[in-house]
Amino acid sequence: MSAPKLLILYGSQTGTAQDTAERIGRQAQRRRMQVKAEALDSYNVANLISESLVVFVCSTTGQGDPPDNMKNFWRFVFRKSLPAGSLCRLDCAVLGLGDSSYPKFNFVAKKLHKRLMQLGASVLLPVGLADDQHDLGADGVIDPWLTSFWERAQALYPTPAGQSLIREDEPLPPRYVFRFLDDVTENRADRLRVPELPISPSQTHPFPGRVVSSKRVTHASHFQDVRHIEFDITGSDIEFTAGDVVMMRPCNTPEDVEQFCQLLRLDPDRQFTLSPTNSDTGSVPARLAQPCTVRHLVESFLDIAAVPRRSFFELLATFATNELEREKLSEFSSAQGQDELHAYCNRPRRTALEVLTDFPHTTAELSVDYLLDLFPEIQPRSFSIASSMLAHPNRIQILLAVVRYKTKMHLPRKGLCSSWLASLDPTQGNIYVPLWVKKGSMKFPKDPYSPVIMVGPGTGVAPFRSALQERTAQGKTANVLFFGCRSQSKDFYCSSEWEEMEKAGQLTLFTAFSRDQEDKIYVQQRVQEQAELLWDLIANKNGYFYIAGNAKQMPTAVCHALKEGFQSQGGVSSSEADEMLVTMERAGRFQSETWS
């Protein structure tokens, strides 16, 4: 009897769904299954009709959108021409990863689950709706869901007779094997050379944008360092419009790279090649040129400065020979130990590199072959473009808040990408950042007479700066901006630009400086105060309303203030005000882009 097969297909934007998919894959390996995990858009979807058992793991992005690496699959699976019974041979399950503080919580997983049933698939259990807001994080839902899944799956696809499960403390084979090349070391100049350009910059072929300037736009006495950074994209053929985002992949700091190499006794200048251990692993990651140096792998690929996930501890535990370390790692890997793990790792934001220093005996036992199993790939970061090509040809500008804060850890916590970008000093010579542009979720009206109302406190104003530059260059003057920050003198971004636009009759500006008076004032209060104007622009002049910024309380409070205005000015009921906003959203006249 041959081993049963399991296919795990994931749609992942930040790497979490991929990590969960790979974790399910390891559980399947321990159950002696033939397993393959891959991104939905890497998979030939035409083969789905001949699969027997598939788990779909997917997150939700933006306003209920699928992740980038499942967009093609999404379009295919929702074709109206697909016959109703086309997946009648398929047993499957859907696990969604989401955050219930967002309005479209796990929208993609719910919709996919429903569509698979429409196509005749046999769904083994209800859709799993993991929630970052759960007391135990996403695992509070994932663990019991997986227990149910394995009960159902193993009843239908039992382990081959005479074979036992692989124990949890026994390492599984690595996905790749390293082969070191003794006679070659890296030429450092090769890494600094500007590469030959492909036709169209993308995630696999980013364009090396030259850093033109990096200026601090907050007062020196202000706690938050915010930068206005400009990149030269001359010769890239990159085009973008207001609302689009620029993507970049950060590097680890030289200090972290050096410490990591010392801990694992690796020579950073040694070169190696990678070989997959079996055909199900897939090819070597495209970003790791063969041969590759240890330095390039650690600096540009392995996410050693991230807060490690539970899967990191599960794998680390299999190497532990020191009894105390093994006990602790096993506890952090267990469902019962998630409170402890949260207290040790998530709350203080302890990095994977710091964990390795806390478990020196286990770190000493690590095999280099497991590095790509242990550490996820550094994920690209997205930034709203804060400029328009009509105002700044061949340039991309961003507003960057440098993330730095204290926890109980000795060293302050730093955002990997923001700290890396802020450390680049263009006055010291030419510096290139690999980047590419992606369509954003915000779309602005083509009609020159439709008013645009934008609420963008803090760095949330970035896409609206792009929109205002674009719209004023096109002669569109019906623009209203609500901007909020702490202090007029310390973090009022782009104030001189707004002043010039106001003088030219191109902008109506409302500001809320929360700390400049005894009672705090926020943008939602300004929205409330301007209820008459907003009602006129929206109800009588086909106005569009946009929100961008931090996802904590602001978007909900602004929506509440807007709906109160509909009630007070339009004489509608509370439920009618809710329905108005829903109708606006469906028509693309209410859009929000928020982040946590």
Image (spheres, rainbow, N blue to C red):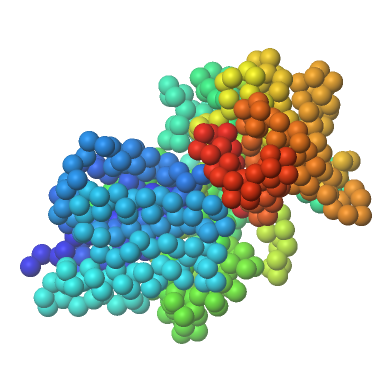
Residue 273 visible to an observer of this rendering: no
Question: Which residue occupies 57% across, 21% down?
Answer: 446
Q: Quadrant of residue 463?
A: top right
- Which of 6/442 is in front? 442
Question: Which residue occupies 53% across, 39% down?
Answer: 583
Q: Quadrant of residue 457?
A: top right
Question: Which residue occupies 22% across, 36% down?
Answer: 81
Determine the residue located farthest toward the right in the rendered image.
518
In the rendered image, the vertical position of residue 448 relative to residue 434, given as above or below: above
Question: Which residue occupies 29% across, 69% down?
Answer: 149
Q: Position of residue 238 (x, y in %)?
A: 52, 23
Q: Position of 368 compared to 512: left or right?
A: left
The quarter of the image holding the N terminus is bottom left
- Which of 413/322 is in front? 413
Q: Position of residue 503 (x, y in %)?
A: 84, 20
Determine the residue located farthest toward the left in the rendered image.
1
Q: Position of 593 compared to 409: left or right?
A: left
In the rendered image, the vertical position of residue 148 relative to residue 58, given as above or below: below
Residue 32 visible to an observer of this rendering: yes
Q: Position of residue 211 (x, y in %)?
A: 65, 30
Q: How many marks?
A: 0
Q: Position of residue 44 (x, y in %)?
A: 24, 41
- Which of 515/568 is in front? 568
Q: Position of 438 compared to 411: left or right?
A: left
